[in-house]
Image: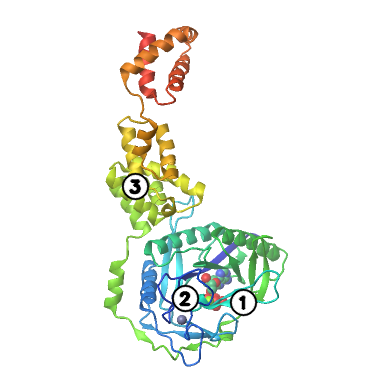
């Protein structure tokens, strides 16, 4: 029997507000443990939560960008459980009335040429827990409450995702949108973006969903992919043996590259949800929602379409350039300075993005001015430097953080396009390389490349190869 995979993803996103979601403590990452706490986020009896307006607006922004419907009445609930990083013994979350629901994210599975809808079941706002620290080789644990009460947005899909690749595509797309919205740094290493995956298998053709397993502890998109691949094989293996799949939570072990059982899955009733009595439910004015909607930035898909129609880019280039907001912005800045979008697109998707990949950094971290690239492009166009020199120049400009123009001046990199000078050199070479001249005249035309090479070597690559080529040919044939 053949099986297919069914996946639903739950993403937790820390919102980049200045202060926590129900108190005024700072959310700054990496500070001294427990230095950003107060009676509210430490769960002191009698302390009262107050909703952070910015966290709420950020949430609505995300919900609208994911095409969700906004709940008429906003209500928070208590999710009760005990854990040392949860001082109140409950988490303020949203249960039966998430602030938004019924959204959709479009992904474009490779090779299909068609985009696919992944339905978003709900987006709700809650608070993060503290963090346990387990010092190595010690028999105690420490708790840091700086993270306690940081606003967390939970984004849950319907089980619409049909493969590991689609799961990956969804995450990349979602992160791209979230970065456009500037509501989070989406840094998985810092834990600002975390993903749990639910996965089941079923015989192809079967309507009913199989028993799902929840996977946790993946710290990178690659980890999500590996964990899903492993779990797909494990579950199909069990199903083929006629074994039962147990509903449980499993942890991804990135060292051993396996998933292991953590606990049998808890049910909603285990949490004894009930409405949070210290936060009154409230209605959001439609005018407020409209205002937020109008303030949304141009999102990746719309931007890609505009790049195609406005700049005549291919769908592929437009997709690559708009996948990250800072790359798209960089591209547009460059086009303003050098209005040849196709050339700029080639350089940004080629040399610039190769640098990002090689260094594993973001555009922001690469720290190269749009004018650095466009100066180089102008120099190629006017024949000051060759295309090959341009690539080296860009690299050096990135590495030394200096302007390409200054490097060219300092290193005397100007391309030699002076015909008189090159003619003189050509004549000298022809006199010296008699054998190649004979070869050429007897029909071995590749002798020309050798002769061009001689001049290029003599000028340390600075001669304009097209002009050299032309001059030599004229001399040989004339
Ligand atoms: P729970 O009540 O266990 O949290 P939800 O219905 O809230 O379950 O779903 C949690 C996540 O699991 C969602 O992303 C959903 O799409 C996904 N999911 C639900 N059922 C399945 C299934 N049978 N196989 C794979 N994913 C599933
Ligand atoms: Zn606090
Ligand atoms: Mg759930």
**Mark linked to residue 142:** 1
Q: Quadrant of the C terminus?
A: top left
- What residue is shown at x 49% (from left), y 63% (from top)? 187
Cα distance in 3D space between marks 3 and 1: 47 Å
> x%, y% of residue 156?
49, 71
Q: As drawn, is 80 to the left or to the right of 245? A: left
- Viewer-proximal residue, 254 or 211? 254
- What residue is shown at x 37% (from left), y 64% (from top)? 181
Q: Is residue 419 above or below residue 104?
A: above
Q: Secondary structure at mark 3?
A: helix
- Label 1 residue near ligand 2, CB within 8 Å: no
> x%, y% of residue 327?
39, 52
> x%, y% of residue 277?
44, 91
Q: Secondary structure at mark 1?
A: strand
* Quadrant in the picture for residue 430: top left
Q: Nearer the viewer, mark 3 or mark 1?
A: 1
Q: Residues within 10 Å of mark 3 (few under 14, many from 20)?
A: some
Q: Residues within 10 Å of mark 1 (few under 14, many from 20)?
A: few
Cα distance in 3D space between marks 3 and 2: 36 Å
Q: Is residue 157 visible?
A: no
Q: How many marks?
A: 3
Cα distance in 3D space between marks 1 and 2: 19 Å
> x%, y% of residue 147?
51, 75
**Mark linked to residue 370:** 3
* Quadrant in the picture for residue 280: bottom left
Q: Are marks 1 and 2 in contact (CB under 8 Å)?
A: no
- What residue is shown at x 37% (from left), y 57% (from top)? 301
Q: Which residue is mark 2?
A: 150
């Amino acid at each position: 029997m053949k099986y297919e995979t069914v996946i639903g993803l739950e993403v937790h996103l820390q919102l980049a507000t200045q202060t926590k979601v129900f108190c005024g403590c700072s959310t700054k990452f990496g500070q001294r443990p427990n230095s950003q706490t107060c009676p509210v986020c430490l769960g002191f009896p009698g302390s009262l939560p107050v909703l952070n307006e910015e966290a709420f607006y950020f949430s609505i922004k995300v919900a609208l960008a994911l095409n969700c419907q906004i709940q008429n009445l906003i209500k928070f609930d208590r999710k009760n459980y005990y854990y040392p990083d949860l001082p109140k013994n409950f988490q303020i979350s949203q249960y039966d009335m998430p602030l938004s629901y019924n959204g959709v994210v479009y992904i474009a599975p490779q090779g299909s040429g068609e985009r696919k809808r992944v339905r978003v079941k709900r987006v709700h706002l809650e608070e993060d827990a503290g963090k346990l620290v387990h010092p190595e080789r010690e028999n105690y644990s420490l708790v840091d409450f700086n993270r306690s009460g940081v606003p967390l947005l939970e984004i849950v899909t319907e089980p619409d995702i049909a493969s590991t690749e689609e799961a990956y595509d969804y995450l990349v797309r979602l992160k791209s949108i979230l970065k456009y919205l500037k509501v989070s740094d989406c840094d998985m290493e810092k834990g600002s973006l975390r993903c749990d995956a639910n996965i089941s298998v079923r015989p192809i053709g079967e309507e009913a969903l199989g028993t799902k397993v929840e996977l946790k502890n993946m710290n990178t998109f690659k980890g999500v992919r590996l964990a899903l691949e492993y779990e797909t094989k494990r579950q199909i293996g069990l199903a083929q043996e006629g074994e039962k799949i147990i509903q449980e939570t499993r942890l991804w072990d990135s060292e051993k590259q396996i998933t292991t059982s953590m606990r049998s899955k808890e049910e909603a009733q285990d949490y004894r949800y009930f409405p949070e009595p210290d936060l009154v439910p409230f209605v959001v004015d439609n005018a407020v929602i409209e205002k937020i909607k109008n303030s949304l930035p141009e999102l990746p898909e719309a931007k890609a379409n505009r790049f195609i129609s406005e700049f005549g880019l291919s769908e592929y280039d437009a997709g690559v350039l708009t996948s990250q907001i800072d790359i798209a912005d960089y591209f547009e800045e460059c086009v303003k300075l050098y209005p040849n979008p196709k050339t700029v697109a080639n350089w940004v998707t080629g040399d610039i993005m190769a640098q990002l990949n090689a260094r594993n950094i973001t555009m922001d971290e690469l720290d190269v001015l749009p004018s650095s690239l466009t100066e180089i492009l102008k120099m190629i166009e006017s024949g000051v430097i060759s295309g090959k020199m341009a690539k080296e120049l860009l690299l050096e400009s990135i590495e030394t953080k200096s302007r390409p123009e200054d490097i060219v001046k300092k290193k005397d990199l100007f391309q030699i396009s002076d015909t008189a000078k090159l003619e003189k050199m050509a004549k000298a070479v022809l006199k010296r390389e008699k054998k190649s001249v004979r070869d050429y005249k007897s029909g071995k035309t590749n002798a020309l490349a050798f002769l061009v090479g001689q001049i290029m070597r003599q000028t340390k690559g600075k001669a304009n190869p097209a002009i050299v080529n032309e001059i030599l040919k004229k001399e040989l044939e004339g």
